[in-house]
Amino acid sequence: MYNALTKHGQLIAFGTGIVVIVLFLGSVLGGLDSFNALSPDDKVTTSIFDLGLKATIVLFVICAIAALLFGLYHMVTNPKGAIKGIIGLAVLVILFAILYSMAVPEKSGIVGQAAANFDVSDGQSKIISAALKSTLILAGLAALTFVGSEIRNFFK
């Protein structure tokens, strides 16, 4: 199975994507006239786009499961090579835990108002804050690493 996916996996993924696109476009273009005839209030309740959305969700779930299973497979078959990945994952979890424990739920200002409008609990607010800060820190580290490696390559 692994060898078949290694050899033909991209072709299968590309072909599946094309089939989903063609089915989606067929369903949308086939009902476009009736969709355009609907009132703005009725356009929200239409199901013309459901096929594309559901197919995308199904493909996403399949890909996520496949990525997880192949990652576990490679970790089990090559535990020595997986040590760096496990350490990196542990560092990410620790970083997120530290940022979560330091996060303070927003109660005032525009963020507090948005949290109240969307009924965001204090725990959810802390998760959102920790996730955003983690993302910004990792993006900053990636940018610094990129610049540093380019400077290093310049002097090589």
Image (cartoon, rainbow, N blue to C red):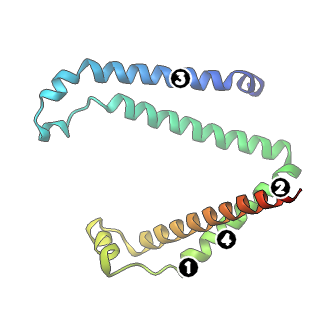
Q: How many marks?
A: 4
Residue 91: mark in rendering: none
* In this view, 153 is above or below 120: above
Residue 101: mark in rendering: 1
Mark 4 and 3 residues: CB-CB less than 8 Å, in contact? no
Mark 4 and 2 residues: CB-CB less than 8 Å, in contact? no
Q: Which mark's residue is nearer the viewer, 2 or 3?
A: 2
The secondary structure type at the circle numbered 4 is helix
Q: At 71% from the left edge and 67% from the top edge, which residue is drawn?
A: 91
Residue 59 in the image, given as x and y percentages of width and height = 51, 33
Q: At 75% from the left edge and 28% from the top edge, which residue is drawn?
A: 2
Q: Earlier in the sequence, mark 4 or mark 2?
A: 4
Q: Residues within 10 Å of mark 2 (few under 14, many from 20)?
A: few
Q: Earlier in the sequence, mark 4 or mark 3?
A: 3
Looking at the image, which is closer to me, 151 or 80? 151
Residue 16: mark in rendering: 3
Query: Distance between the Cα atoms at labels 2 and 3?
Result: 40 Å
The secondary structure type at the circle numbered 2 is helix
The residue labelled by disc 4 is 94
Q: At 61% from the left edge and 76% from the top edge, which residue is drawn?
A: 98
Query: Distance between the Cα atoms at labels 4 and 1?
Result: 11 Å
Looking at the image, which is closer to me, 143 or 126? 143
Q: Where the C terminus falls, by quadrant?
A: bottom right
The secondary structure type at the circle numbered 3 is helix
* In this view, 2 is above or below 82: above
Q: Which mark's residue is nearer the viewer, 1 or 2?
A: 2
Circle 3: residue type: Thr
Query: Distance between the Cα atoms at labels 4 and 3?
Result: 38 Å
Mark 2 and 3 residues: CB-CB less than 8 Å, in contact? no
Q: Earlier in the sequence, mark 4 or mark 1?
A: 4
Residue 87 seen from this side: no
